[in-house]
């Protein structure tokens, strides 16, 4: 059955956020704290990601957590002690900020157990998702809220069926850090058809410089494929390998398209990108930006 191309498209309402990785690039900060909880200015990275899902109309959020799941669950839960202390002080603005994260979305959690790869993390979402198309947002990938990507991907999936991935052009010497897509143009300027996918190819073997970034809208048939996907690169069950199978035969679950993203994106699991995200977002904040930018200017001119 061509599940991705049914006449009446079920509306996409569910978002899955894998956040069970080991975060080895950020050790020792991530020894006891998930990397998704590292603050970007004054919110943990994961809150931006949940806000992005909600902004795209996805209010049902399933987080795939690992060994350090407590801080993630606590962050999206009420904290009555803190709230009552702020209430007593009459600190309304901080009280609102504390409540913001618990009122955002309907949160669900599933435990991955062993972190056997992104594909395996997505497979853990199968019982919750059922047979509807759904979105996956990587918990350490931050898309600037002013550059909406997920809502465009949801539109493309609703128009074209199948699955939709997010792609970004990167310099050829960077492509070995990403999944890479072979593509064909479509009649939409920012949409390409994906014909093949390779996980972290050597520069010479890369079919293009289109890198996969951490947003997906997937046909539920991906779960059937993931159940039989063997561990690939790094001994992990790779989502890219399962998507490659969908792209290779569109009779199975509809086509795979890519939305080419040209906006601002940060990989908060990478130390350099994490620092850039903080500086940029802090500069743009109305409350912090003016003072911080003035300090940054003098720091750069005087000390660098
Ligand atoms: P990464 O490739 O960044 O891996 O995962 P990682 O283990 O988290 O980090 P490093 O490379 O060791 O520093 C991409 C996303 O997939 C999730 C991660 O939490 C991250 O959001 N993931 C990865 C899982 O949920 N489970 C896994 O088994 C692997």
Image (cartoon, rainbow, N blue to C red):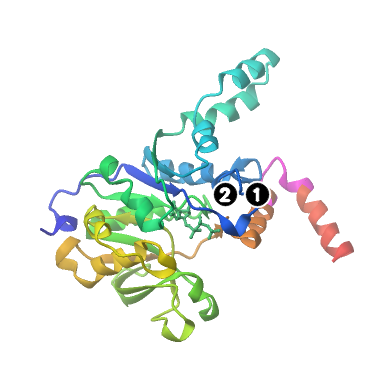
Above or below 255: residue 81 = above
Q: Which of the two labelled residues, at mark 1 and mark 2, occupies the earlier sequence position?
A: 1
Above or below 194: residue 23 = above
Pointers 1 and 2 in contact (C-beta within 8 Å): yes
Asked whether residue 167 is in view, the answer is no
Above or below 134: residue 251 = below
Magenta stretch in the rendered image: 283-291
Q: Which residue is mark 1?
A: 29
Tell me what residue is drawn at x 27 percent, y 65 percent: 256
Farthest bottom residue?
204
Say if the magenta span includes residue 289: yes
Say if the magenta span includes residue 35: no
Q: Position of residue 99 (x, y in %)?
A: 54, 26
In three-dimensional space, the C-alpha distance between marks 1 and 2, rounded to whole angstroms, equals 8 Å
Tell me what residue is drawn at x 47 percent, y 81 percent: 202
Tell me what residue is drawn at x 48 percent, y 42 percent: 51
Q: Position of residue 60 (x, y in %)?
A: 35, 37
Above or below 248: residue 111 = above
Query: Which mark identifies residue 35?
Result: 2
């Amino acid at each position: 059955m061509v599940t991705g191309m049914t006449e009446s498209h079920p509306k996409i309402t569910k978002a899955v956020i894998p956040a069970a990785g080991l975060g080895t690039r950020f050790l020792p900060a991530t020894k006891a704290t998930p990397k998704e909880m590292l603050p970007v200015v004054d919110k943990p990275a994961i809150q931006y990601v949940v806000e992005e899902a909600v902004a795209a109309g996805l209010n049902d959020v399933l987080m795939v957590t690992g060994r350090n799941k407590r801080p993630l669950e606590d962050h999206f839960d009420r904290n009555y002690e803190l709230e009552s202390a702020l209430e007593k002080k009459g600190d309304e603005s901080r009280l609102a900020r504390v409540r913001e994260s618990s009122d955002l979305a309907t949160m669900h959690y599933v435990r991955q157990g062993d972190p056997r790869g992104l594909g395996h993390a997505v497979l853990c979402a199968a019982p919750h998702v059922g047979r509807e198309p759904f979105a996956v947002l990587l918990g350490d990938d931050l898309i600037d809220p002013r550059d909406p990507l997920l809502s465009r991907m949801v539109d493309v999936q609703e128009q074209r069926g199948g699955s939709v991935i997010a792609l970004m052009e990167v310099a050829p010497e960077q492509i070995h850090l990403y999944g890479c897509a072979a593509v064909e143009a479509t009649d939409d300027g920012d949409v390409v058809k994906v014909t093949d996918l390779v996980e972290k190819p050597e520069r010479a073997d890369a079919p293009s410089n289109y890198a996969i970034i951490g947003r997906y809208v997937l046909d539920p048939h991906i779960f059937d494929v993931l159940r039989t996907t063997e561990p690939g690169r790094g001994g992990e069950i790779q989502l890219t390998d399962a998507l490659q199978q969908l792209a290779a035969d569109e009779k199975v679950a509809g086509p795979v398209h890519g939305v080419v993203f040209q906006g601002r994106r940060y990989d908060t699991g990478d130390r350099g990108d994490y620092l850039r995200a903080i500086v940029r977002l802090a500069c743009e904040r109305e409350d912090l930006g003016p003072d911080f930018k003035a300090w940054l200017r003098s720091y750069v001119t005087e000390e660098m």
